[in-house]
Image (cartoon, rainbow, N blue to C red):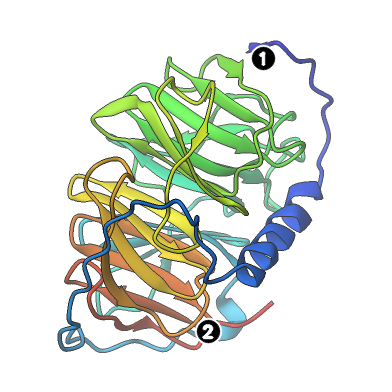
Amino acid sequence: MSVAGRERVPGRSLILVVALGTTLAMLAALTGCSSPETNTSIASTAAQGPSAQTAPVVDAPDWGHIHNLSLKGATLFIGSHDGMWKQEQQQEPVLISTPAFDVMGLTPNGDRWLASGHPGPEMDSPGNLGLMASVDDGVTWQSVSLSGEVDFHRLVAADNVVVGLSAHDRTLLRSEDGGQTWLDLGSPPLYDLAVDPTNATTVVATTSDGLVHSADAGRTFTPIASPALLAFLAWTDRGLYGASVDGQIFLSTDEGTTWTARGEINGQPESFAADASTVISLVGDSIVESLDGGLSFSPRVTGIARH
């Protein structure tokens, strides 16, 4: 392991599992709050008709708890307690990871996928998988670093830069060599984060007090105005999408300085992803999708078992 600035203790921890739930509950309790000094520009956009597609019903006994959603074009990838799943529009999800493992922190990174989590029953691996990578679209996975030491519940990447939040102590870690070595950036109270795909020194993150922005690769953060209390972020080539704790969707094209109101989802988001004009969120027992940049949503996958 190569992590600058802090010694790590191996072993699985559930601290951040609880902390993330607590943080989201805190965010929900603060819904509707915004900075009195905000200069945020919010332009409301009229919702269009729902995206036209049929939502397949997922067979609940074959489904594990969903941790992360991600998109590559129109294809949906799902990181669950029982492996990584792939779903094409209007098709049943298919388990693709071999062997299946508890997939945390799922994120695309060029021609590979990155993830973290815990081993499945067929794996002879430490309790915390560290950083894992797949170069065959999520079918097989290899250890990259931090095996036995870190479980990332949040991962974002741009080119050779990988940024992750550790589940053990909420430490923010950054790698500039594809995840081989890591810099310890302390433990800022972040919930979700996004990195600019064209400038990886720019990071925006959500906290229980609002948005924060970093211009020095996550070394320091400063508060920025927020249109609502945002829980999730997703940075695409179209801009930075945000989902509030009560399901409002926003889009920023200037690193979070100003935001445009889009549409809303019916409920509290539990996971969130975007690619270009496609926006996805887990809400209750359904994954809902927008094909028009978050203006309108319709079910894509329904009947997801609750845990």
Q: Residues within 10 Å of mark 1 (few under 14, many from 20)?
A: few
Q: Nearer the viewer, residue 159 or 84?
A: 159
Direction from residue 250 to residue 28 in the image, left or right: right
- On the image, the x and y values in percent for residue 31 come to 56, 71
Q: Which mark is residue 181?
A: none
Q: Is residue 245 above or below residue 230?
A: below
Residue at x-position 41% and y-position 52%: 38
Quote the CA–CA distance across marks 1 and 2.
39 Å
Element under label 1? Answer: loop
Q: Is residue 53 above or below residue 261?
A: below
- On the image, the x and y values in percent for residue 240 come to 30, 49
Direction from residue 108 to residue 163 in the image, left or right: right
Residue at x-position 84% and y-position 25%: 9
The mark nearer the N terminus, 1 or 2, is: 1
Q: Quadrant of the C terminus?
A: bottom right
Element under label 2? Answer: loop
Quadrant hosting residue 20? bottom right
Q: Quadrant of the N terminus?
A: top right
Q: Report the amino acid beneath label 1.
A: Met
What residue did someone put label 2 on?
285
Residue at x-position 49% and y-position 38%: 141
